[in-house]
Image: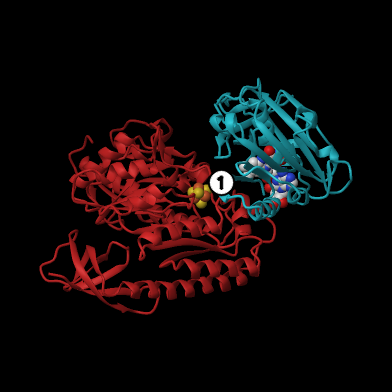
Chain colours: A red, B cyan
């Protein structure tokens, strides 16, 4: 930067963990370059909106945040990036009040673009280098856990998903880069790392596959623990299951089932069936009986019959997910599912969604209750009026009383009771001294 | 002929000029393009758009890995959005191709030693032609389900002893009826690899039959078109 005055920057992030990680990395970049991070409402010099386009609702939300931004921050440099910037690039570029539209592949170079702008250099975003892994290890973050990006893109082309169109082909970050990023992130003080990407199970760098990379990460020295963000149930070997015996790897997986009906799964172009999913769940629970599985379910996919939906309810019951991210199917323009026959009415989708949500709460409460009496190592995220809150190894939310505790430390807690009887229920515990 | 490309538009790596169109039936045709500028595994697919248009669709690669042309097999879908436009294209028009995509690609090691049954409905035969052209000595049987025998696209290019045609609307194939009916009557060696391609209803039924016959889901690979 060439001016002496400290410039201010604000960020708005929508969507998934990967987007959040990329924002965190940009925050680090801008802070290192001397920018001051300010609230979005504090008339910043630069506003970066990191958008999402995964559902129609995400589009609406992203659009509304962009309009709000350009209205509020009239004199600011407005940068729109993220998946929506890929999906609606030309449309966004035609909006005068947006200074730059930067595609995902060039997102990591936004600082260069903004710096050039302030120094009077004319740089078009398309001139920025394309590199989806060029992010700084996160330093200054609003979170206690940091994501580690190991992979980007996906070419599975599930019929409901727009991601392959906006994130491009599957690509893996080189092993050495990943390990370096882990080392630096741990040095920066993070106690918990979340291995992140679009389809991380597809990680492949030469002979190194996902589970090999995970082994290498776990063997790095340091006081940290590791979570896996979300996995496609593509089938895992016994070696992957055994890896979870490692004390640094947390006993929780978010395995995206999407439907409990094999017919629906095929229409979604998901290349596993319920029996394979069952096999995976059994493999894990045979060794780790309280292993926590959470999942995504889409209800009301085109052509979903009563019987197919019932199979989903059966699967939800059988696999005892402690949390279900329930998506009511909505047409995503540009996907294959848009052109499938037999789209269902909103009424049916609402009814089915409610049934899954209710079951999900029931399962969550049952799973949390099963943990009562156990000791959990809780990473403290927040302390309010002497009550600490955070997540234990199994990714159950836990609260407990503490005096002189500190955020971003791990404390052992014995779980005593379940509080609440809805989606937001949590476990209460006592500090083990 | 008029090109859809704007005058200032550069010839991009992903642009391919149509070299030939082979009409195979009343509504199915193949489009021949210059040799692929990317390496692909037989069985994989590409996305194909018309330059200047706003949509694209996925198509399995119909040609072999070493063929001098990239080729796709297309069936015009009645009331479809994209295929009627493709149908109207003439030699010389430019298509935008991205890829290759997908995990349905054949591994050379497996092709050399494996025993395969390829099960296809309609244009679902496309990836298998690519595989067979790439690995001419591969040990395979194709079970191809169509409605009319004329849909046995490029039938003469397969070893007649290895190609089983099932026709559901006329008795002109090796089997009269749906391919799933034929599949039920077959016996296969336990180590067989099954590759299924086409519409999801056929794939669902075929999977059930194969699982009933005792084959493991891990021996079966699927490519769903719709
Ligand atoms: C991985 C993959 C590979 C594919 N490879 C091929 C290929 O090699 N050749 C090919 O012709 N198509 C192939 N398809 C289908 C292709 O992508 C288009 O869906 C198809 O060409 C119809 O496009 P459309 O815009 O005309 O129809 P749309 O307006 O998209 O209407 C779609 C409807 O047409 C029907 N339909 C789709 N494909 C077919 C088909 N092949 N035969 C009969 N009905 C169909 C379905 O009911 C679907 O709901 C493939 C699809 C995938 C996902
Ligand atoms: S696996 Fe399917 S749902 Fe997941 S990103 Fe890829 S296409 Fe989308």
The image quadrant of residue A282 is: bottom left
Q: Height in image: A263 above or below A130? A: below
In the drawing, does residue A373 fall left or right of residue A165? Answer: left
Residue at the extreme left: A404
- The residue sitting at 47% across, 48% down in the picture is A84
Confirm whether residue B132 shows in the render.
yes
The image quadrant of residue A363 is: bottom left
x, y percent for residue A225:
25, 53
Q: Which residue is mark 1?
A: A157
Marked residue chain, label 1: A
Badge 1 local density, few (<14 within 10 Å), some, or many (20+)? some
Between A152 and B174, the one nearer to me in the picture: B174
Q: Height in image: A176 above or below A300? A: above
Between B80 and A57, the one nearer to me in the picture: B80
Confirm whether residue B82 shows in the render.
no
In the drawing, does residue A55 fall left or right of residue B151? Answer: left
Q: Quadrant of the N terminus of chain A?
A: top left
Q: Height in image: A317 above or below A242? A: below
Label 1 residue near ligand 2, CB within 8 Å = yes
x, y percent for residue A328:
54, 64
Q: Quadrant of the C terminus of chain A?
A: bottom left
Between A407 and A262, the one nearer to me in the picture: A262
Q: Secondary structure at mark 1?
A: loop
Between B218 and A77, the one nearer to me in the picture: B218
x, y percent for residue B52:
64, 35
């Amino acid at each position: 930067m060439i001016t002496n005055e400290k410039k201010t920057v604000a960020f708005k992030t929508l969507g998934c963990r990967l987007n959040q990680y990329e924002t965190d990395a940009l925050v680090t970049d801008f802070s290192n370059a001397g920018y001051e991070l300010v609230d979005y409402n504090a008339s910043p010099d630069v506003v970066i909106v990191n958008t999402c386009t995964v559902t129609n609702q995400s589009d609406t939300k992203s659009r509304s945040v962009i309009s709000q931004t350009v209205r509020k921050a009239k004199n600011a440099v407005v940068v729109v990036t993220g998946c929506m910037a890929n999906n609606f690039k030309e449309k966004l570029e035609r909006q005068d009040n947006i200074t730059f539209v930067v595609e995902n592949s060039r997102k990591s170079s936004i600082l260069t673009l903004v710096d050039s702008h302030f120094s009077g250099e004319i740089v078009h975003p398309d001139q920025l280098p394309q590199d989806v892994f060029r992010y700084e290890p996160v330093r200054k973050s609003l979170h206690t856990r940091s994501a580690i990006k190991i992979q980007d893109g996906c070419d599975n082309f599930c019929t409901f998903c727009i991601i392959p169109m906006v994130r491009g082909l599957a690509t893996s970050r080189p092993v050495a880069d990943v390990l370096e990023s882990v080392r630096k992130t741990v040095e920066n003080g993070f106690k918990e790392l979340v291995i992140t990407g679009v389809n991380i199970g597809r990680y492949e760098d030469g002979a190194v596959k996902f589970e090999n990379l995970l082994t290498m990460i776990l063997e790095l020295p340091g006081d940290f623990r590791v979570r896996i963000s979300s996995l496609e149930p593509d089938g895992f070997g016994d070696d992957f299951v055994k890896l979870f015996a490692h004390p640094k790897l947390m006993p929780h997986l978010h395995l995206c089932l999407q439907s409990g009906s094999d017919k629906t799964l095929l229409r979604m172009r998901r290349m596993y069936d319920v029996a394979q999913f069952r096999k995976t769940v059994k493999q894990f629970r045979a060794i780790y009986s309280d292993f926590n599985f959470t999942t995504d379910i889409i209800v009301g996919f085109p052509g979903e019959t009563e019987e197919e939906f019932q199979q989903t309810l059966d699967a939800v019951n059988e696999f005892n997910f402690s949390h279900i991210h329930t998506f009511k199917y909505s047409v995503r323009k540009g996907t294959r599912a848009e052109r499938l026959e037999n789209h269902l009415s909103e009424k049916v989708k609402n009814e089915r969604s409610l049934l899954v949500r209710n079951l999900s709460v029931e399962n969550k409460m049952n799973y949390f209750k099963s943990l009562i009496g156990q000791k959990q190592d809780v990473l403290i995220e927040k302390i309010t009026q002497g009550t600490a809150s955070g997540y234990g190894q199994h990714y159950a939310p836990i609260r407990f009383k503490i005096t002189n505790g500190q955020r971003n430390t791990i404390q052992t807690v014995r779980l005593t009771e379940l509080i609440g009887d809805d989606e937001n229920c949590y476990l209460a515990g006592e500090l083990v001294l | 002929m008029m090109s859809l490309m704007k005058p200032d538009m550069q010839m991009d790596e992903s642009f391919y000029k149509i070299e030939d169109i082979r009409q195979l039936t009343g509504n199915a045709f193949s489009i021949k393009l210059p040799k692929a500028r990317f390496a692909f595994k037989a069985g994989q697919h590409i996305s194909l758009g018309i330059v200047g248009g706003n949509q694209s669709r996925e198509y399995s690669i119909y040609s072999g890995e070493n063929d001098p042309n990239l080729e796709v097999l297309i069936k015009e879908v009645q009331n479809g959005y994209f295929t009627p436009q493709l149908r109207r294209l003439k030699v010389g028009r430019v298509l935008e191709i991205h890829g290759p995509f997908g995990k349905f690609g054949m591994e050379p090691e497996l092709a050399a030693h494996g025993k395969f049954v390829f099960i296809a409905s309609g244009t679902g035969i496309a990836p298998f032609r690519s595989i067979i052209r790439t690995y001419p000595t591969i040990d395979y049987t194709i079970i191809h389900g169509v409605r009319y025998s004329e849909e046995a696209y490029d039938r003469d290019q397969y070893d007649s002893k290895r190609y089983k045609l099932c026709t559901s609307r006329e008795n002109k194939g090796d089997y009269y009826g749906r391919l799933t009916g034929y599949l039920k009557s077959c016996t296969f060696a336990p180590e067989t690899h099954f590759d299924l391609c086409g519409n999801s209803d056929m794939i669902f039924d075929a999977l059930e039959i194969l699982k009933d016959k005792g084959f493991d889901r891990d021996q079966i690979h699927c490519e769903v078109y719709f």
